[in-house]
Image (tube, helix red, strand yellow):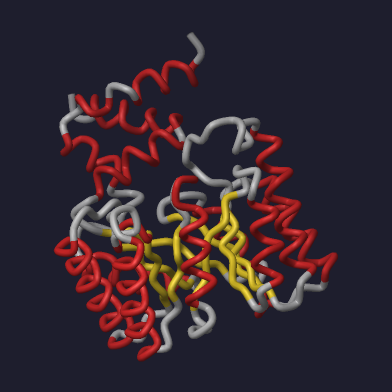
Amino acid sequence: MSAKLLHQAIVGTMPLVPRPIIWRFSRRYIAGTHLADACETVCELNAEGSTATIDVLGEDSTDDEQVEAALDLYFEALHEIHSASLQSGISVKLSELGLRYDFERCESAMEALLAEAAKYGAFVRIDMEDSTVTTDTLQLYSKARETYDRVGVAIQSCLRRSEDDIIQLLGEGQTDVRLCKGIYLEPEEISYRDADEIRESYNRILDLLLEDATARVGIATHDPLLVQYAIEALERYGTGKDRYEFQMLLGVAGPLRRELLAAGHAVRVYVPFGELWYRYSMRRLRENPNMVGHIIKNLFAGL
């Protein structure tokens, strides 16, 4: 059995592993369980020259009480970012604001969050989830940017529809897109499965965004091939520094991040935190089974 298949097989057994061990692995990729942990991490990132986006871990709320709890935590995060003068925005999954059970409830919650963020001049990124909510997510984003300037959305290059979605967004006017590969396992008829196809889609979409002077793009990738293409494309299009930034996840590709900073590129790091860290950790493992090696080491550490 190849190492990759072995790691994938082990991922399937991870729910059997005690959570404290999973936490030992996850701590590298999650700031902590409390907002103070996230703010401390953002402060450290700011000191090295990176900006940040605080991500309150959570998704798939099933009632209004959960939505209100999420909003309260986001409001607190916005206040702390402002009061501590942190260079950070926030990101939100719309399912955390009720998208899956009540579209109108989600819409009103998003309006409240954007209005609160506007008080502080904070930027709000709408994360993209699986394909069942792509259309609704883009609809809510399009409506939000009619009123708010400091709001953006994520687009996944693995989805076959994404180029058309970008063309639609660009046709609506100024837009801010976080371009990533995407981590959700989708049917082949709606998504690219081959790594090279996903990269090719990523580069085509990046070209569309850089060609349009009204677009701003977060180049969200740890893939050295995509980073190199992006650097060449930025030079080719003469893209100003105010129109792009590289984006990475906490705990991933630190040397590459510092290399980009040293070269004069803006870099933003996503800083997740919250009590719901376990689901996030398992998704990271499914995305990259090679991370299982770290867990195996932790399992035997100190024996």
Q: Residue at x 75, y 77 (%)?
A: 213
Whether residue 215 appears in this view of the structure is yes
Percent of width and height locating residue 118? 40, 87
Query: Is 103 on the left-hand or right-hand side of 231?
Result: left
Percent of width and height locating residue 232? 79, 59
Instruction: Farthest residue to the right: give it.
Output: 236
**Residue 298, relative to residue 43: is it above or below?**
above
Query: Is 275 on the left-hand or right-hand side of 95?
Result: left
**Residue 179, relative to residue 82: is it above or below?**
above
Q: Residue at x 39, y 28 (%)?
A: 293
Q: Residue at x 36, y 91 (%)?
A: 119
Compare residues 153 and 173 and report the one nearer the observer. 173
Percent of width and height locating residue 216? 64, 73
Percent of width and height locating residue 130? 45, 46
Compare residues 187 and 118 and report the one nearer the observer. 187
Compare residues 300 and 219 and report the one nearer the observer. 219
